[in-house]
Amino acid sequence: MDNSITENENRPPDNIGASLRKILFTFMKIGAFTFGGGYAILPILQREIVYRLKWVDGGAFMDILIITQSLPGPLALNCSILVGRRLRGTVGGLIAALGIVLPSFLIILLLAAFLLPVVWNNEFVQAIFYGLRPAVVALVAAAACNLGREFVKDRFSLGILVLLLAVSLAFHLHPVLILALGALLGLFLFRKSDPQK
């Protein structure tokens, strides 16, 4: 087994100062004000946990995103579990997961129980949702631009980005295959020949 993986599993949490209450309310706020889920949550996650609270740095955030892309389940939930675990261990991961799903669960329960029959065919509600759809696309595009500026810094990275984007659009491959292809390209293009480097 890789020693670096073993060391990461056994290392203590990064930020003992982050209370469980703070983790819970931070992820509840993220979960409550994110429409569209998935990639639309990335700008809000990045702003809160990287820039505002500084719980992780940009590189660690990108590593977390890479890991969550290769795991089954919702991106927001997986990401929150990894950040919470990094901060306060397994309990922190569970609290962060509770925080991210609780607002959506309560809102859906409220809608299903009381509001859905009233608002289902309401023209104002329909108009709001038509406006939210392009807003979600804008959030996803903003997240992609922010991540691109931070991590695509040379011509090889840009070449991989363009190639994988073209392959994805042309062949509609599963995201796991795109990630695997990116990993293979990284292995061949960016591997250091001298292990000391």
Image (spheres, rainbow, N blue to C red):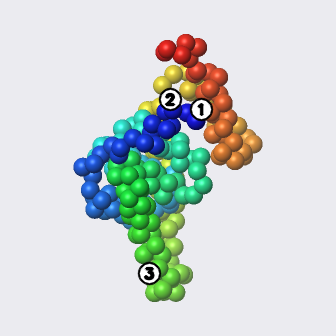
Say few, some or many: other residues with alpha carbon within 10 Å of mark 3 (under 14 / 14 to 19 / 20 or more). few
The circle on residue 161 is 1
Query: Which of marks 3 and 2 precedes in the sequence?
Result: 3
The answer to whether 163 is drawn above or below residue 52 in the figure is: above
Whether residue 162 is visible to the viewer of this picture, yes or no, is no
In this view, the residue in front, 18 or 113, is 18
CB within 8 Å, label 3 to label 1: no
Give the residue displayed 41% in from the left and 69% down from the top.
102
* Three-letter amino acid code of the residue under disc 1: Leu
Return the x and y of residue 94 as percentages of the image width and height: 42, 61
Q: Secondary structure at mark 2?
A: loop
CB within 8 Å, label 1 to label 2: yes
The answer to whether 150 is drawn above or below residue 143 in the figure is: above
Give the residue displayed 56% in from the left and 27% down from the top.
158
Q: Which residue is mark 3?
A: 110
The CA distance from mark 3 to mark 1 is 42 Å
Q: Secondary structure at mark 3?
A: helix
Return the x and y of residue 76 as percentages of the image width and height: 48, 56
Left or right placement of residue 185 versus residue 102 in this view: right
The CA distance from mark 2 to mark 3 is 43 Å
Q: Which residue is mark 2?
A: 152
* Three-letter amino acid code of the residue under disc 2: Val
The CA distance from mark 1 to mark 2 is 8 Å
* Three-letter amino acid code of the residue under disc 3: Leu
Q: Quadrant of residue 192?
A: top right
The answer to whether 155 is drawn above or below residue 147 in the figure is: above
Query: Which of marks 1 and 3 precedes in the sequence?
Result: 3
Say few, some or many: other residues with alpha carbon within 10 Å of mark 2 (under 14 / 14 to 19 / 20 or more). some
Whether residue 42 is visible to the viewer of this picture, yes or no, is yes
